[in-house]
Amino acid sequence: MRRMVAEHQVRPADLVLPAFVREGIAEPVPISSMPGVVQHTLDSLRKAAADAVAAGVSGIMLFGVPLVKDAVGSAGTDPDGILQRALRAVRAEVGDELVVMADTCLDEVTDHGHCGVLDAHGRVDNDATLARYAEMAVVQADAGAHMLGPSGMMDGQIGVIRAALDAAGHQDVSLLAYTAKYASAFYGPFREAVNSSLRGDRKTYQQDPANGRESMRELALDLAEGADLVMVKPGMPYLDVVRRVADAVDVPVAAYQISGEYAMVEAAAERGWIERERAIDETLMAFKRAGADVILTYWATEAARRLAG
């Protein structure tokens, strides 16, 4: 009876699997702060993509970890960069059976670890970064990405990328806007996952956790610039923002269950303090109840198998 009258349901198709691929490794490398998650080789990434398809997951978001980083993130716009090779490998493996997404940001490929190009004073240069994003977007689309996720929180990034894609003939590549991305303490394990070299913090371009109305201003800008989907990140600490965004728009809304959220559940479950699978499923339901249509989660394949079973 509880199932019959349930108001919300999480489906495998609601889930997207974030995945890391690292250049220069022969075997997958475990991420110590995210038990069960690895930095993939191209071969193991192909298998992970195929497993996601088999489980009914709808998408995969790829993050590349290059061997060499520099001040402007050259690996991000190199057609032979690790992320571009990963995009081609996954498309070759699964074709259109997954929505293949690319992280369109510089933080994984810069030696300073920031999401943008720095000016002479060491500050992120918004407009110079937009030029790099436009170039990166076209290279990722050329490599086979169905959808791009500009995660750097630069002003105007959706509009600039949309214009660059259209000019390059990639009108069918869609944009997942990181509309409300907060300067959160929960990103810690992700920094290990991408071998981050971040110096300082990102408070000058990510949102203040104290602010909610600000996210609605960002939402209006992203929609005006041509966003196809909008996202809130992190997820669980910002369910109120997910709800506000979902109530305000008629485009799909995504939430990203980030590395710190994953790590907390896994750590508590390892110690026997919570029931692992029940806790995972409860967190996913929280996103649906708050209004998310799409959930990015490192448990995507596992949870999809359980839901399908």
Image (tube, grey):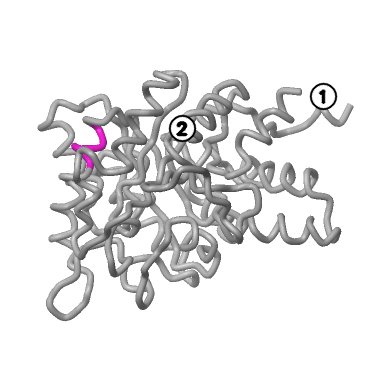
Disc 1 crowd rating (10 Å Cα; few below 14, some 14-19, many 20+) is few
Q: For the stretch drawn in magenta, what is the main secondary structure?
A: helix
Residue found farthest to the front:
26
Q: Which residue, given by chain and number where applicable, does mark 2 sit on?
A: 43
Callout 2: helix, strand or loop?
helix
Q: Position of residue 11 (x, y in %)?
A: 64, 28
| Residue at the image position 52 percent from the left and 66 percent from the top | 188
Give the magenta range.
137-141
Disc 2 crowd rating (10 Å Cα; few below 14, some 14-19, many 20+) is some
| Residue at the image position 17 percent from the left and 54 percent from the top | 130
| 208 is higher (above) or lower (below) than 287 | below
The N terminus: image quadrant? top right
Question: CB under 8 Å between callouts 2 and 1?
Answer: no
Query: Which label is found at residue 4?
Result: 1
| Residue sitting nearer the eye, 140 or 197 | 197
Q: Is residue 247 visible?
A: no
